[in-house]
Amino acid sequence: MSSDWKTLTLSEIVDFGNGKARPKTEGNIPIYGGNGILGYSGDSNYQDETIIIGRVGAYCGATYFEINPIWVSDNALSAKAKEGFIAKYAYYVLKSKNLNQYAQGSSHPLLTQGLLNKLEAYVTTNLEVQEKIVSIIGEIEDKIGLNAQTNQTLEAIAQALFKSWFVDFDPVKAKIAVLESGGSAEDAELAAMNVISSKNLDELTELKQAKPEDYRTLSQTAALFPSSLQESELGSIPKGWNIEPLGDHLDVLQTGSRPKGGVGGIKEGVPSVGAENIIGVGNYKYGKEKFVSREFFDKLKRGVVEDFDFLLYKDGGKPGEFKPRVSMFGCGFPYSEFAINEHVFRMRSKSLGQAFLYFQIGHQRVLDELANRGGKAAIPGINQTDVKTVPIIIPDSLEVLSSFNKFALKVIESILKKSNESCRLADLRDALLPKLLSGEIDLSTLNEETSEVIA
């Protein structure tokens, strides 16, 4: 091994510093604590490249990296790379140490500068090698970050279309405006078709540029909307549309189950996903789930998740407070097979379509209704009756529903596939990083090989 590789204390690699109490000023500068970004401020106490380490509590040892001005709060520590070390390389070294294992105190874990300074790490002092390691891992993380950003954009486009069609009823209002000004029915249809551009919605304008064929199909569908509104229990809705209980349109509404005695002692098997991972389409926190045995899973008669199942968090929280969340899985994400536990509802609807179901129940009006019902329960949460009796708006045109579902389901499928890709890349990163940091891997050809895998 080259003499460039040495065992050094962390105090020889970085300078640690303390955070300070959160400032009261408001702004757009991130405030970091042990659990990542806590909020935003108008002030900063650290600039440039900074490593942040959770200092106390449940997130003790959690490690983050920032290149912009930030405020490090008093439940976190900072670290700045010393001369001779690239900041991102130092971050990878600290992160690979799994610092939470060194925390002192079981009931209230704590990391101190004194403790961290004494820890040792095997590192390279060769800046060229550090740069290569940062480049290789950085390329993978950049792709993961791009996937996450793309997924946010994709969901925002589908959300914007849902809101425009099924909440604001823009095509209907566009037709009404034209007819009231003396325009013809043909002019009204044209106005409905152009409503996306006329509203200048950034997300939908982006759709017009990126997917012109999809945009054209959706515009043609908008012409099918009614040209007047009617009153309903939910306010004004398109004429001919109905308000109906969700239960009239559900083919599947079920929760999962666990074996007698719970799952505490089961360390492997088939994943059993709970409420903590009902956090939106394409999102999942690995390591949070429990497992059931293969034998138990094979005998399950309910709660086995299928592609594009709509999932709803059903109970839990503080007394008097319930905050429902929605999610959708599929395309092998987060697993090729898994179940839900008793804290999650699984739903399917042939008449509404899975995509419409996701965006309809995930809309704030419905979530607020479920939150109100769930907050009144002795144990915060909702039951099947609560779900079935929620009023929803039902379009009278199958073509309108079909067009939205076809488009939105493609969006959801793309999100899930990109999430799967990010999981694969994260596995690659986690496998490569310890080998790179130990000098075990020959770096001469790795950049090219890694680029091929990422592509």
Image: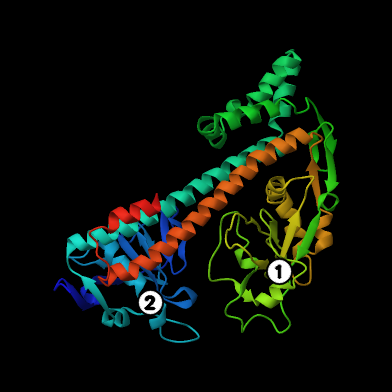
Measured as percent of width and height from the top left, residue 368 is found at 72, 54
Does 401 sit left or right of 411 as displayed?
A: right
Disc 1 residue type (three-letter):
His
Q: Is residue 24 visible to us here?
A: no
Disc on res. 99: 2
- Quadrant hosting residue 371: bottom right
Asked which secondary structure carries label 1, the reply is loop
Residue at 48% x, 52% y: name it.
Answer: 148
Q: How is the image coloured?
A: rainbow
* Residue named by callout 1: 343
Q: Residues within 10 Å of mark 2 (few under 14, many from 20)?
A: some
Residue 107: x %, y % from top left: 50, 85
Left/right placement of residue 337 relative to residue 385 reads: left
Q: Quadrant of residue 53?
A: bottom left
- Which residue is depicted at the point 58% across and 40% down? 157
Q: Amino acid at mark 2?
A: Leu
